Image: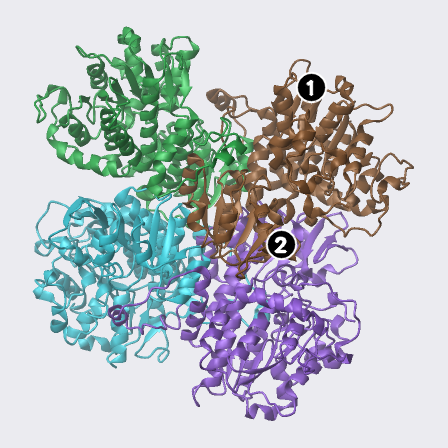
Chain colours: A cyan, B purple, C brown, D green
Amino acid sequence: MPNKKKYNINGESGMKAQIQFADQKQEFNKRPSKIGRRSLSRSISQSSTDSYSSAASYTDSSDDETSPRDKQQKNSKGSSDFCVKNIKQAEFGRREIEIAEQEMPALMALRKRAQGEKPLAGAKIVGCTHITAQTAVLMETLGALGAQCRWAACNIYSTLNEVAAALAESGFPVFAWKGESEDDFWWCIDRCVNVEGWQPNMILDDGGDLTHWIYKKYPNMFKKIKGIVEESVTGVHRLYQLSKAGKLCVPAMNVNDSVTKQKFDNLYCCRESILDGLKRTTDMMFGGKQVVVCGYGEVGKGCCAALKAMGSIVYVTEIDPICALQACMDGFRLVKLNEVIRQVDIVITCTGNKNVVTREHLDRMKNSCIVCNMGHSNTEIDVASLRTPELTWERVRSQVDHVIWPDGKRIVLLAEGRLLNLSCSTVPTFVLSITATTQALALIELYNAPEGRYKQDVYLLPKKMDEYVASLHLPTFDAHLTELTDEQAKYLGLNKNGPFKPNYYRY
Amino acid sequence: MPNKKKYNINGESGMKAQIQFADQKQEFNKRPSKIGRRSLSRSISQSSTDSYSSAASYTDSSDDETSPRDKQQKNSKGSSDFCVKNIKQAEFGRREIEIAEQEMPALMALRKRAQGEKPLAGAKIVGCTHITAQTAVLMETLGALGAQCRWAACNIYSTLNEVAAALAESGFPVFAWKGESEDDFWWCIDRCVNVEGWQPNMILDDGGDLTHWIYKKYPNMFKKIKGIVEESVTGVHRLYQLSKAGKLCVPAMNVNDSVTKQKFDNLYCCRESILDGLKRTTDMMFGGKQVVVCGYGEVGKGCCAALKAMGSIVYVTEIDPICALQACMDGFRLVKLNEVIRQVDIVITCTGNKNVVTREHLDRMKNSCIVCNMGHSNTEIDVASLRTPELTWERVRSQVDHVIWPDGKRIVLLAEGRLLNLSCSTVPTFVLSITATTQALALIELYNAPEGRYKQDVYLLPKKMDEYVASLHLPTFDAHLTELTDEQAKYLGLNKNGPFKPNYYRY
Amino acid sequence: MPNKKKYNINGESGMKAQIQFADQKQEFNKRPSKIGRRSLSRSISQSSTDSYSSAASYTDSSDDETSPRDKQQKNSKGSSDFCVKNIKQAEFGRREIEIAEQEMPALMALRKRAQGEKPLAGAKIVGCTHITAQTAVLMETLGALGAQCRWAACNIYSTLNEVAAALAESGFPVFAWKGESEDDFWWCIDRCVNVEGWQPNMILDDGGDLTHWIYKKYPNMFKKIKGIVEESVTGVHRLYQLSKAGKLCVPAMNVNDSVTKQKFDNLYCCRESILDGLKRTTDMMFGGKQVVVCGYGEVGKGCCAALKAMGSIVYVTEIDPICALQACMDGFRLVKLNEVIRQVDIVITCTGNKNVVTREHLDRMKNSCIVCNMGHSNTEIDVASLRTPELTWERVRSQVDHVIWPDGKRIVLLAEGRLLNLSCSTVPTFVLSITATTQALALIELYNAPEGRYKQDVYLLPKKMDEYVASLHLPTFDAHLTELTDEQAKYLGLNKNGPFKPNYYRY
Amino acid sequence: MPNKKKYNINGESGMKAQIQFADQKQEFNKRPSKIGRRSLSRSISQSSTDSYSSAASYTDSSDDETSPRDKQQKNSKGSSDFCVKNIKQAEFGRREIEIAEQEMPALMALRKRAQGEKPLAGAKIVGCTHITAQTAVLMETLGALGAQCRWAACNIYSTLNEVAAALAESGFPVFAWKGESEDDFWWCIDRCVNVEGWQPNMILDDGGDLTHWIYKKYPNMFKKIKGIVEESVTGVHRLYQLSKAGKLCVPAMNVNDSVTKQKFDNLYCCRESILDGLKRTTDMMFGGKQVVVCGYGEVGKGCCAALKAMGSIVYVTEIDPICALQACMDGFRLVKLNEVIRQVDIVITCTGNKNVVTREHLDRMKNSCIVCNMGHSNTEIDVASLRTPELTWERVRSQVDHVIWPDGKRIVLLAEGRLLNLSCSTVPTFVLSITATTQALALIELYNAPEGRYKQDVYLLPKKMDEYVASLHLPTFDAHLTELTDEQAKYLGLNKNGPFKPNYYRY
């Protein structure tokens, strides 16, 4: 079984490295040697092998060591067109799905509206995402909208076996389990697309591996495919590369850069998960602590706001003068990391950059300083520089290492420098609901778009749909939107139903 | 003399109305009749006759009733190429300019850097803006950068006579005083452009009146003009109209929509001025008060943040579901105005829309409710509906009216529904500094741009310049920017000196 | 006429100095020589000659130079038992009183409840307080409760002439005007107590001057006096001294130390007035400014909370480790003043101590640093040390001085180091309402207390009355209190109507 | 083995019930019948059998079912004067103690200062507290100060076996393990006091059980005992009862009501633990959620501040008008629970009262409403009323139950209505450090006090010591206290070393 520690959690880090499909072998060699042995399937993106947070796991790993591929399982209707860990866990998974449904009102609303017309009637969607209760709600919503779906996992660790079982039980051909090997990973994807008598006409991807597989193995399939919906930074980057290279042969929708995703996932979600992640790992008290946050983008803004509100004293580093000026106006001292590194209790990176925290910084930190990463990659902290003989590593809890200097100083490294919020805290269903709804709408849009509206290019979701996603989430807060009068709409030169803002509006 | 009360404060309200130069007479008739008598110069934009905040006036109006146009004045060097209220006030004005210089470090830095090269050498700039200490710092900076300037006021009330005197004393041909008639207004503009032996090659405008005058009277002048820099919403709108109509004959720079202006002027400035405006007019206590803020754009966000921080309970109304969802996540109940109108202590409009607060709402407000406008126009509150015989108006302080219902209920109307922050609070020099620096850089860019970089169109300031403006303001906060290493810049695919973000970045 | 600048604003500074009535002459000699010439009435407390904020003045000072004492005035009912500036201003004053009534619901509620029984029937109250619209509401409430009142001002500058006129017009014997001489001051007090056929049986004092006068001139009067209600720190201190010395001959109620006064006046009121005071005097922007607040008591807590909320970076100095630890937990860096004095933009004192800001600190401040005092005395900043020949003082606005060092550095000194919130901002009526209600209830309690409940000592208002004052202010916020069930009251061992907390409870 | 569910977590709830030692049987019968079977030792306080948070448990419960009482264990020095689960876990426990030491700088400072003089030389301390890493640091500090200690657990579940082992290994006679029976509980206590050749002269108690045991079994021991230090509300209450009844035969120190404990434990600690507790149990998002907090004491203030800061909309209920007015001024709508019960997403009780949330309230809550208790007792929510046949309970996670109504509505009940922060979140070491330091100083004070300073009564820690505890914690924040100059101390009438405030100061 692969050693968790040897895998990096976040594919985004390798953003640049992984987008070239052409010459993977060469590219692959640039990776740290420790993952070099994944020789069977070198093109797998790193994100596919992230060690996903155990926080998301409802039950302990079963003792059953038999590979699901070797099992004979049938659901209660007699179907065996699936491959999950244990179909008997379906009931527990169903309850998780039901709980998630309560916090995903937007998808439930889409189901309701679709009782008459089925906007996805005839759609054959192949999907490759994390398999969680929230994804299950999405998948069953797509079904309710008329689509047929086949699904694989985009990550070898993140599948919730119970949920996969519940989906299989209710008739979804799902091929995924927690702890897949890389061979399993591609086998599952292949089982989704390589089906007799069934050919997908829509792709929902998270990371680009599914898209990549079809490009590589079944390029002819694209003739029938109406479009790709892609969620991740990595996958979107791959699509833009394909587009630039003139190789993108269907329209693609970039849902990663929609307003609701960016402002809500990043700002609001990080505002909460920084506190949660730090508490769950260290039980530290925030009040009075000195913290430096590297980067004042949406993620940094969220972290800073939360920690300030809890009584921490927060310093910010920035490279962009505009964000820097925002930090100043928001009440944070803008410093260089060197200026405060000796005095802070916590260092948090939120930059998307590499080597923001260097060994030199680590050497100068005070005893018990906590170091963690909330940014986009696992390269922000130069963790590799800590793996030297003179330093001792001590695992004190799951996701928490003490790195000890010869003089006894120790720093507290969280999640080995990988993403704290993915590793050590949970993501609220509400945020996932926004993303899932965006994906559903993007599928509907691409599937129903009249010939010619979308070309072989990468598109952002139309603003009106972004607004629609938002409006579907307002009832959660019992929020009441005001409607423009005819006179007001005319005065503003707007349609009463939106879109309400120019494209360049910054929110 | 025109009655101040009879003029609306803010040209933006008439955004749509005033952009057509072709058919002003007709358009003009749509205005409220009370300003109909300004017949001599009907094309003057409303913004030119705003009654500007008395807060910005350093000294009481002089008793001298003689028109400056009828006076013979010379500065100490013997020049009489100016027209101001009283050249003898120069010394007092100089001190105000010196105080402003201390809070406009970015312009002072530009002066310093320009000691060798003069990026505006040869530039002949004609300007039409508010004449304040801050403008004076801008003007003298342009001079230090090598430019010759001639200047008029963009508003008949906003000129600070002492500052105008100080500028005239140090050799700037300034034509402006507080309380110009409309005839004076155009006369002053004309004195700036219609000069023997001097022809402008750059225009700096605020509201579009100067541009309009040249279009109308001296269209040939555009042959030598390299570009227009325009700051206001109204002026920018006019330029886009000209551009659409194919009539824009030089490049123009829209500095209104630059990030620094939008995020800083609107969000941060309103965060402070809403408190200031309410305190100066009503001495109210914020703690525990129930407030409804209409509109959750940058202005609304600033108002809500400040009032919440001071212990008010804030409700928000919105038409845009995305902004609405932001309000929810920021902790505000999203309501329709009707739901809370009976219970709130304060109503604040920040919409840019019209009739957001109607007579019906006003009828239902509770006794002593305060009503004010922080948005873009004076039409947000239907003040006209309050000018009916059954209601009694009582002016209780400058800018504060009690409107009294027959049953004794009174509401407190601030600034007659015009902009509270323009009428009843002051604008920090720091914010004006950001805008002034942006204007200076836009002038430099347009003046030095190689042939062909800019066409006859309206441009936004290049992001890199936006970033430069921000960076010039960081020393105010003793803020230390981090520089990318070569390795990091390469990793991110960025130039070490910026720009650091894609154009669609939302900040 | 006395030069305003020569009087210190706040009697508390002289707390120790002014409590000995016995040996005033000697004590007096310790005062700065500049007030030495007030030889006619040396026992006047400093607070009596505070230069009160002009912000509280509704109309400009009249040109009428005739002393009110020399005028013959009658109100519309023919009475001339009063002495005010100009009885004709009564109507304007009445409107101010009416406005104040709207924000003093607790007193209005007391009036309503008193329609049947008159708890002050027979009370003859002599009062000596600031004469403002809010005091007028108190006075007229006492009248409605059955009391007869005679009133003088406790400060030679703070009287609002219009309000005094309105009171006189409605029949209150008021003896007060703005700009009294010290001789006038004592004359007015004397006219209140030295009346044929009328002798007070209750005293309402603010500062102790009235009490002192009666002690000195009419000691026999105390035989009929049922009690003293005193509001100020100074006055309370004097009473405790009298009590200690065994000279207090009637019960006295200390309303200064009631919870509602301390927590609300200090914390909440300062939270708002620090922002207001700084804005009105300097128009500064708070965002990003570095501020040091000296002292983290209630006043300091309020200042820090407000400035942090507005985006300032706030440092705190403290001598008390408990308050210091609170500052830390609330997110403020605890420093010694020396550590940050070179870098801060604003210095605010809230200590009640002396020479907290020394000349040495002032010498080290950076250019344009703002210095002000929110504490209890005018000695917190060593302003005297700035009155040396090498420094130039420049008055740039009312209450704003630039003090200029030989090298050109200037600091901005507000209110000459006196209390910023008293000098440069207004106090919300709501806060004054709490105090006024407390005074009214203290009068009722002392007047109606059965023989023996109170001895010749200084008492705090019973907690139950403190709670009652609070409850009378809840309707302002439409706040709904929960009532204990019988079962709950029993469980907690409380009376359902309170008091709800032990005396040592800290709130 | 006792069923966890059958024990109430918090002795405070039974405050009234447990203080009478005289008539326990009778009193006991009032308890809910489900704990009736604890017949062997009815006087055990409820707090002794709290089911302590599993969050505080470092390792999974061992499979070893042998009772520690039946084991023969020796530490490495050959001693067997202890009784713990497994002496071999000592090394792991030592590491936990070392980690705790890093966050308990005040105790470490006390050790350092005691290197010369040993203020507890000769002290023989018997203790009964939770046995955690933090307690271990306290115990070893007492040892370093010269004391001999013997220790038992005050709660049958809260002992960390590894820590107990580490203490035993280093020579402390510790008698405690996780999962004691009630018989074990008293046996352990007895083993601490009933020792040949050793008699305690100081008592450190938490809950009063140890004190009670000595009173009951070895009353003569009090002849040599110099004092009792008691931390808990329950224990303090028992002491006051003893004192009132004239039965307290030694001085006792109430450390529960010291400022540092009250303000820091309650306000700051709850500010953090409410977020932590809710996240760990429900993974909910705070932003935009509607919350009602019952009670606005220190705990309620902390909860409200945190939730507001995270973007929740918070309503408050109160019975005390003063706290209610504070809630208003802090920006919370004050409501009766009934007014908002249908709309809120979360209900949090912080009252110390009983039946604050009744079955009627629970019936009216909306689907998925979360209900939890942060107050002093497990009676705040009427959980018993939910144990009726028509409602279904579903345990969805540890400490999380769904209670399901016949119509499908479910509410989410946390910790079965027991204290959320004790059950579902961890307490920061820093807070425990404050309490532990206070305990150590109280022991030193009582042990060294000259004859006659303390009588047979209950005392608060002298304010100066409270200040000293605070000062020992300032270095954690790198906080620098300012010292009074001689002149300032004289001016304020204070000793330069404190105490700095009168006893009634509210902080």
Q: Are marks 1 and 2 on the same chain?
A: yes
To which residue does mark 1 refer?
C250
Q: Please state which amino acid type lies under the numbered disc 2.
A: Val
- Residue C426 seen anywhere in this rendered image of the structure: no
For the point 65% across and 77% down, the residue is B168
Chain letter, disc 2 residue: C
Looking at the picture, how far across and down is residue C410, in whole percent? 55, 58
Residue furthest to the front in view is C389
Q: Nearer the viewer, mark 1 or mark 2?
A: 2
> Is residue A219 positioned above or below C504 on the image?
below
Q: Is residue C246 above or below residue A125?
A: above
Residue A440 sits above or below residue D242 on the image = below
Q: Which mark is residue C400?
A: 2
Q: What is the x, y in percent for residue A203?
A: 26, 68
Q: Is residue B421 left or right of residue D160?
A: right
Q: Counting residues from the N terminus, which is met first, the one under dot 1 or under dot 2?
A: 1
The foreground one among D251 and A266 is D251
Q: Is residue D299 above or below residue A35?
A: above
Report crowding for label 1: few under 14, some 14 to 19, many 20 or more residues within 10 A (C-alpha). some
**Neighbourhood count class around disc 2 (C-alpha, 10 Å): few under 14, some 14–19, many 20 upward:** some
Q: Is residue A309 left or right of residue A210?
A: right
**How far is the residue under mark 1 from the one under mark 2?**
44 Å
**Residue D472 sits in which quadrant?**
top left
The image quadrant of residue A11 is bottom left
User: How far across and how far down the image is residue D54, in percent?
Assistant: 25, 35
What residue is shown at x 55% (from left), y 93% (from top)? B223
Observer-nearest of B86 and A57? B86
Residue A357 visible in the current orientation: yes
